[in-house]
Amino acid sequence: MTSPGSGTIYTETVVYSPPEAYVNDVPYQLAIIQLENGRRLTGRIDGERAHVGDKVTFVDFRNSVAFFRKAA
Amino acid sequence: MRPVAVVGIGKTAFGAFPDRDLRSLAVEAGQKALEDAHAKPEQIEAFYLGNFAGPSFVGQNHLAPYVAAGMGIIGIPATRFEAACASSGAAFFNAVSAVAAGIYDVVLVTGVEKMTSQPTPKVTEILAGAGDLCGEVRAGATFPALFAMIARRHMYQYGTTREQMAAVAVKNHANGAKNPLAHMRKVITMEQALSGKPISEPLTVYDCSLISDGAASVVIAPLERASEFTGKPVRVLGISQASDNVALDEKDDITTLRAVKTSAAKAYKMAGVSPADIQFAEVHDCFTIAEILATEDLGFVEKGEGGPYALSGKTCLQGERPINTSGGLKAKGHPVGATGVGQICDVVQQIRGAAGERQIARNQLGLAQNLGGSGATSVVTILGAA
């Protein structure tokens, strides 16, 4: 899988009530990222809480899910 | 196209009913609608069933003939429609289309869901099947999460507040407390609504509709035959169904539900009315933000004004345009496959003047808006006294 690159947070949430598959992950931050290539992607945010408009950079794929981190 | 009328309605209570199975709920609602229409099972020419996830929730498939036979209806076409939480709205739209086209005269439409036999994480997972499993859901999206992200963007673009969303919950609980068939007949305060347990930020438990069991049914017929069944027929003045992308991240602007705008515009045109003419509405408040979006996308207010409108009191039972006099999905309950037809029953009840404590005075022109997923299916129906 190719890196989606960096982008900005279009919208986000922190999930407390998970589906069965992610009961051990809560709470986790989910976001729709506006990528620099013009597309949007739903992924997870690692580490520091990010808000709408914040720049984020791609970290890695885990089980085909893109993880991002708030840009320094 | 022939004019079509709703000539019978029937609902079960919505709630958690551990002793009831899916079929018994559907049969109860269907029999009540037949009784209300003074119709016999053998008069029904086709059966349309709305159900989102019976196979996942209870394991049963081949649901339409299974349910129909339980009502003593055998031999006619019986088909299940699945369109997520708009399943029975879609069933109703297709049934009305068939009667309007002259294919059938007397048709029964039922919506049903049996959800409470599964634990919440499992229910959450089954409901997430209405999203994109290869994208957003794999990343961890639940339906509360998708609507939380809609809410967050709406807050960012338009300044919508937690208090405005909470006002929807307070109002709908106040209405639900007056509805004998509602799942949660409990008044809540603004303070309570603002301090609920977080489900998916910024949504708390008070922003989310309920996980419910229940069923609803209507009998429809050509308007010219309506007097054979009822003294108070209610005419389907306009109806439309529209679709959009399933994945939230594929929609251009998630603060507008495009399918709602499209289906509303077509339904208004068919009925020959404008949004300002609509006196009351049952809208799809699966989450409080969804009612705010609905009031905007149905054209009751401009985009971005839905939040202040919710807080203004104009949508309360005594307001200028009452919304969700039934208690909405928030308090009445949301047995997902039953919701669309349930809304039709609620609007018909108001037009008949039979809504009891919740009866409103300006009750001659009502609208029902049923939504599937995060907006990939929308059905809008405009109903009026015949």
Image (cartoon, coloured by chain):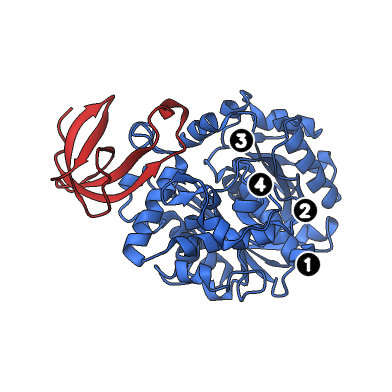
> Which chain is represented by red in the image?
A
Q: Which residue is mark 3?
A: B80
Pointer 2 and pointer 3: residues touching (CB < 8 Å)? Answer: no
x, y percent for residue B36: 83, 51
User: Within 10 angstroms of label 1, few (less than 14), some, or many (20 or more) residues?
Assistant: some
Q: Amino acid at mark 3?
A: Arg
- The local secondary structure at tag 3 comes to strand
x, y percent for residue B180: 77, 53
Front of the two marks 2 and 4:
2
The disc, 1 or 3, on the residue closer to the chain's N-terminal end is 3
Distance from Cα at disc 2 to Cα at disc 3: 29 Å
Q: Which residue is mark 1?
A: B353
The disc, 2 or 3, on the residue closer to the chain's N-terminal end is 3
Which residue occupies the foreground of this view, B294 or B287? B287
Q: Amino acid at mark 2?
A: Pro
User: Chain ID for label 1?
Assistant: B
The disc, 4 or 1, on the residue closer to the chain's N-terminal end is 4
Distance from Cα at disc 4 to Cα at disc 3: 18 Å
